[in-house]
């Protein structure tokens, strides 16, 4: 009865209710980077035609202030749960079977919570956690800022777009025959996953890599460690990695560091500022806890281009005259910030615009410029300018 009433009350209180129907299955098969197959257990979104689990599980997304209701149908022969890692849920919805409930084979369990704080969270099965999590029963929860705006947290710094990097190691021997495991502490992973992928699977995946970034982008990366070792992220020069949040809360003050260590279960929100063109990679090292032993390493490509601004021109504003000599007028009033770049990506000028219609870019340079306007919601408009 409670489970039925909760969403109704939610709507009465004016809250948006976000629902997910997940299924748990133990018959997943995925392909590793070298072509080998990996058997796994996991979750999928309910589908009338039946489903197959995905690795990692479906990402649960909502906005701060939403009510979230997740139902889990168990389509396997063992019990499972969903533990919402880092979220402020009550004990009944915590997914720890001894203090809440098991979802037995064939049954449906329902978890609900109020997304009170924008941030980065995780979920995983809490039945025989060490085994079930390693077998693939995990996924991410992203609580976006209120109203879904592109801010790291409500009222926090804005970003152009975000990426999530959810890591786990894979000990393939466990997946080949989990009944043969005699000593779980002899965990020896041999594959290293970012969003369930490795090596060239990552390089070609634009949901993980930044393949067509442009100078001026601000990218929020959501680092989430679902493995049993430390993740050490080493960012290339030119991205100014700035940690702004940790474990679902804003940091009291931002931390700028080229290296970020993420321990098991931890989550960090890191802003990357693409201030110059670059073609490089973020290194992710997988390190054994307490031993300082490097298990493995993955590369996440980062291509930031200056020139591709020209192809991405968004003519939201009518700019005139263009070509210009000294002044540029916008066809409509605009509140926000502006930046002017040379075609090579050098920032020439920036400032705040407020209902202003006149820009005076740096004088004495002729040729092509890029004008970038960013409004208060983080929407970015670009326009190519030509000075004669
Ligand atoms: Cu499970």
Image (tube, rainbow, N blue to C red):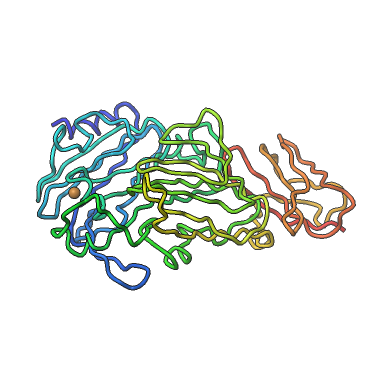
Task: Work out whether 197 lies above or below 256.
Answer: below
| Any part of residue 45 in sight | no
Disc count in the image?
Answer: 0
Query: Is 96 displayed left or right of 267 in the figure?
Result: left
Give the residue at x 56% y 58%.
Answer: 302
The C terminus is located in which quarter? bottom right
Q: Closer to the camera, 201 or 284?
A: 284
Quarter of the view holding residue 308? bottom right
Task: Work out whether 12 lies above or below 180.
Answer: above
User: Which residue is most to the bottom?
Assistant: 35
The spot of residue 210 in percent (x, y) is 53, 58
The spot of residue 1 in percent (x, y) is 13, 31
Give the residue at x 9% y 50%.
Answer: 105
Query: Is 143 displayed left or right of 339 in the figure?
Result: left
User: Which residue is most to the right?
Assistant: 364
The spot of residue 48 in percent (x, y) is 20, 58
| Any part of residue 388 in sight | yes
Query: Is 46 displayed left or right of 232 in the figure?
Result: left
The spot of residue 82 in percent (x, y) is 23, 43
Task: Work out whether 4 lies above or below 319.
Answer: above
Q: Closer to the camera, 288 or 205?
A: 288
Query: Is 231 displayed left or right of 6 in the figure?
Result: right
């Amino acid at each position: 009865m409670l489970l039925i009433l909760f969403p109704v009350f939610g709507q009465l209180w004016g809250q948006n209710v976000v629902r997910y129907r997940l299924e748990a299955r133990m018959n997943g098969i995925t392909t590793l980077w070298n072509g080998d197959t990996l058997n796994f257990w996991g979750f999928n979104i309910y589908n009338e035609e039946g489903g197959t689990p995905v690795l990692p599980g479906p990402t649960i997304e909502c906005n701060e202030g939403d009510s979230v209701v997740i139902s889990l149908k168990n389509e396997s022969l063992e019990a499972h749960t969903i533990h919402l890692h880092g979220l402020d849920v009550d004990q009944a919805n915590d997914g720890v079977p001894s203090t809440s409930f098991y979802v037995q084979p064939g049954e449906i369990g329902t978890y609900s919570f109020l997304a009170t704080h924008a941030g980065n969270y995780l979920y995983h099965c809490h039945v025989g956690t060490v085994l079930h999590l390693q077998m693939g029963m995990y996924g991410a929860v992203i609580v976006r800022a209120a109203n879904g705006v592109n801010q790291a947290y409500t009222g926090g710094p804005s970003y152009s777009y975000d990426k999530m990097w959810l890591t786990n190691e894979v000990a393939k021997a466990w997946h080949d025959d989990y009944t043969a495991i005699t000593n779980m502490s002899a965990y020896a992973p041999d594959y290293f996953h970012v969003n369930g992928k490795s090596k060239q699977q990552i390089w070609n995946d634009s949901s993980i890599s930044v393949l067509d970034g442009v100078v001026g982008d601000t990218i929020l990366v959501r680092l989430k460690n679902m493995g049993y070792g430390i993740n050490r992220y080493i960012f290339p020069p030119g991205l100014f990695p700035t940690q702004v949040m940790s474990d679902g809360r804003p940091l009291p003050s931002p931390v700028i560091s080229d290296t970020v260590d993420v321990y098991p279960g931890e989550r960090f929100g890191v802003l990357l500022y693409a201030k110059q063109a670059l073609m490089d990679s973020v290194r992710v090292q997988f390190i054994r806890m307490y031993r300082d032993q490097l298990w493995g390493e993955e590369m996440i490509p980062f291509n930031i281009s200056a020139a591709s601004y020209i192809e991405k021109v968004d003519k939201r504003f009518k700019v005139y005259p263009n070509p210009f000599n000294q002044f540029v007028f916008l066809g409509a009033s605009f509140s926000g910030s502006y930046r002017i770049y040379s075609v090579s990506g050098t920032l020439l000028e920036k400032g705040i615009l407020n209902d202003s219609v006149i820009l005076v870019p740096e004088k004495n340079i002729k040729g092509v410029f890029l004008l970038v306007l960013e409004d208060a919601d983080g929407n970015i408009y670009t326009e190519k300018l030509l000075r004669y």
